[in-house]
Image (cartoon, rainbow, N blue to C red):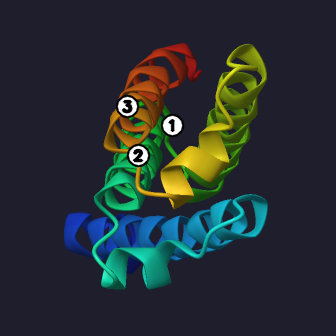
Amino acid sequence: MDVFWENIIVETAARYSVVILCTIVFLAIFELVTTYKNWHEIKNGNFAVAMATGGKIFGIATIFRYSIEHNDTLIQSISWGTIGFILLLSGYFIFEFLTPTIKVDEEIGKGNKAVGLISMMISIGLSFVIGASIG
């Protein structure tokens, strides 16, 4: 059985499956903390929400990329990926806090593309910093 789990194709499929599942769970958490409904807004053509959500997806994927690269086991990768996600989520709240004149969440929900773009870039940028810090 050890030979089965050491096969690179099996290992890749396992890591891929886990990252997809974690991405779905993490996006659901983002959905809970935002005032707008991501997929409803994207369906209606809200480009700001699409950019912000795309940045979150890219951020989650980037964090897991580093997590997989620097950890041998799937459990370690999931653990560091989860820690990275918590930091990414914290970054979202910090962005909201540091811009008191702009209600980030509200502006993205209203379709403000400029705020959506900045949100996307913050998610992408933070994901590289978080990923580089993963042990």
| Residue at the (65%, 35%) spot, across then down | 92
Q: Amino acid at mark 3?
A: Ile
Check disc 1 and report its element: helix, strand or loop.
Answer: loop
Quarter residue 46 falls in: bottom left
Quarter residue 118 falls in: top left
Q: Amino acid at mark 2?
A: Asn
* Relative image position of residue 122 (x, y in whole percent): 46, 26
Q: Amino acid at mark 1?
A: Asn
Camera-side mark, 1 or 2:
2
Check disc 2 and report its element: helix, strand or loop.
Answer: loop
The relative height of residue 126 versus residue 65 in the rendered view (above or below) is: above
* Residue contact at pointers 1 and 3, CB within 8 angstroms: no
| Residue at the (54%, 22%) spot, across then down | 130
Residue 1 can be seen, yes or no: no
* Relative image position of residue 102 (x, y in whole percent): 64, 28
Q: Depth check: 114 or 128 in front?
A: 114
Residue marked by disc 3: 124
Residue marked by disc 1: 71
Q: Is residue 36 left or right of residue 118?
A: right
Residue marked by disc 2: 112
* Relative image position of residue 99 (x, y in whole percent): 68, 19
Q: Depth check: 12 or 38 in front?
A: 38
Label 3 vs label 2: CA separation?
19 Å
| Residue at the (29%, 66%) spot, across then down | 12
Q: Is residue 65 left or right of residue 85?
A: left
